[in-house]
Structures are given as C-alpha cells and as structure tokens.
Image (cartoon, grey):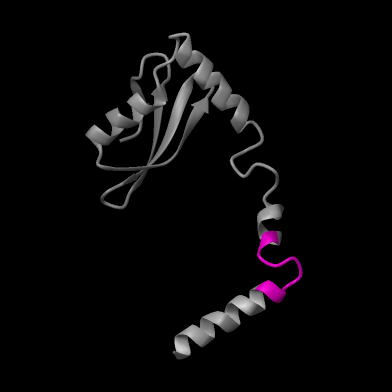
C-alpha cells in the first residue's frame, strides 16, 4: 500500500511541473526519428515497388536468421539500409546492407 502512495505522489509531482510530462516530448522536435525520415520511407517504398530495392522486411528476416535478436531501428541511408539490432546475447550491432542486392556490407 505504501508503494502505491509513493507512486501516486510521484505522478502528481510530475504532473504539477510546468508543462507536465508533455513538455519533454515537445523538446525533441517535430520528428524524433529525424527531419527526413518520412522522405526516406517514401523513397524506400518507391524503390521496392519499382523492383530496384530489396524489401526491408526481407533484410530483417535474413539478419534474424544469422543473429538471433530483434530490430531496434531500421531505415534507408543513401543506397544502403542501416539496421540497428539487439542481439539475444545483449550486443547491439549496426548492420549496413546494400538496399539493391540485400548483401550485408558490414555488421554481425
């Protein structure tokens, strides 16, 4: 019961701060993923639809077969995909994959 009271008091204090918890979100800017993430996403989608790029889902499946774990972040950077991966053994691995061929350039 004491733990619940402590949590309620802490929540009330945070809410009472100027701007509350939402002020922290606004400080990150309009797009916490980066200003051009939407354009990169559209570019990747168009490349996959035209057959010029390998689907990111296929790249992620390939990485998962090589290194058990999960995706932290993934996106198109130039002509490559960057996949940030949390390996099951606790390592964080940044994979660079050729978006046209699906070949892993670095990582793992």
Q: Where the N terminus falls, by quadrant? A: bottom left
Looking at the picture, does residue 25 appear above or below residue 5?
above
Q: Residue at x 45, y 31 (%)?
A: 82
Quarter residue 101 falls in: top left
Looking at the picture, does residue 74 appear above or below residue 99?
below
Give, as a single range, the part of the protein colored magenta.
Answer: 15-22
* Residue at the outermost bottom position: 2
Looking at the picture, does residue 107 appear above or below residue 55?
below
Q: Residue at x 66, y 35 (%)?
A: 35
| Residue 71 horizontal/vertical position (percent) | 38, 41
Looking at the picture, does residue 91 appear above or below residue 56?
below
Q: Where the C terminus falls, by quadrant? A: top left
Quarter residue 70 falls in: top left
Q: Residue at x 41, y 28 (%)?
A: 96
| Residue 47 horizontal/vertical position (percent) | 49, 14
Q: Is residue 89 magenta?
A: no
Q: Residue at x 51, y 20 (%)?
A: 45
Q: How many numbered discs?
A: 0
Helix, strand or loop for the magenta stretch, by majority: loop
| Residue 105 horizontal/vertical position (percent) | 37, 24
Image position of 47 (left or right of 32): left
Image position of 56 (left or right of 61): right
């Amino acid at each position: 019961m004491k733990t619940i009271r402590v949590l309620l008091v802490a929540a009330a204090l945070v809410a009472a701060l100027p701007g509350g918890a939402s002020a922290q979100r606004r400080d990150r800017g309009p797009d916490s993923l980066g200003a051009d993430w939407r354009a990169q996403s559209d570019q990747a989608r168009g490349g996959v639809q035209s057959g010029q790029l390998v689907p990111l889902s296929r790249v992620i499946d390939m990485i998962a077969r090589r290194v058990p774990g999960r995706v932290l972040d993934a996106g198109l950077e130039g002509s490559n995909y960057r996949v940030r991966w949390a390996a099951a053994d606790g390592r964080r691995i940044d994979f660079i994959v050729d978006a046209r061929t699906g070949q892993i350039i670095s990582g793992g």
